[in-house]
Image (spheres, helix red, strand yellow):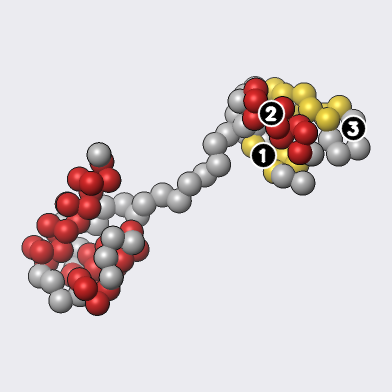
Amino acid sequence: MPTRTLDVALWDYRDQAGRKRRAHYRETFELPDSEVERGERAGVFTNEPTASAPPLPTKSSTNRELVDWLVERGDADRDEVKGLTKAQLWQRIETTEDVAAQ
């Protein structure tokens, strides 16, 4: 059964056995498919979490940390950027962040 987290104060639903249940804000619970559809139409569930981008590295980061950041973001191949200078890495990071902001 699908699991959802409630994003409203209270919501009444029916469990798999057809019994009435009540969920409270931020409670995570299992639902039959019919109740998932009903809840999604009503907009009572939280959005599914998405993978968040790693935080921007600090200016004191080493070249290796900058390379790791670019690779972790999926914006570069390690072999492609490991030979760059710190200034070139920062330029690449700033370009990446500018594109992500658009």
Describe the element under mark 3 as helix, strand or loop. loop
Q: Pointer 3: what residue?
A: 18
Q: Is residue 31 visible?
A: no
Residue type at mark 1 is Arg
* 11 versus 61 height, above or below: above
Q: Pointer 1: what residue?
A: 4
Quadrant placement of the C terminus:
top left
* 46 versus 92 height, above or below: above
Q: Residue at x 65, y 25 (%)?
A: 41
- N-terminal of the pair, mark 3 or mark 2, is 3
Would you say 14 lies left or right of 44 here?
right
- Distance, label 1 to label 2, CA atoms, is 9 Å
How many neighbours does mark 1 have within 10 angstroms: few (below 14), some (14-19), or many (20 or more)? Answer: many
Where residue 62 is drawn, which disc sits there? none
- N-terminal of the pair, mark 1 or mark 2, is 1
Q: Position of residue 5 (x, y in %)?
A: 64, 37
Residue type at mark 2 is Gly
Describe the element under mark 2 as helix, strand or loop. helix
Q: Pointer 2: what residue?
A: 39
- Distance, label 3 to label 2, CA atoms, is 16 Å
Q: Are the residues tagged 1 and 2 within 8 Å (C-beta)?
A: yes
Splitting the image into 4 quarters, where does residue 78 fall? Answer: bottom left
Splitting the image into 4 quarters, where does residue 57 fall? Answer: bottom left
Describe the element under mark 1 as helix, strand or loop. strand
How many neighbours does mark 3 have within 10 angstroms: few (below 14), some (14-19), or many (20 or more)? Answer: few
Q: Position of residue 92 (x, y in %)?
A: 16, 59
Residue type at mark 3 is Gly
- Distance, label 1 to label 3, CA atoms, is 18 Å
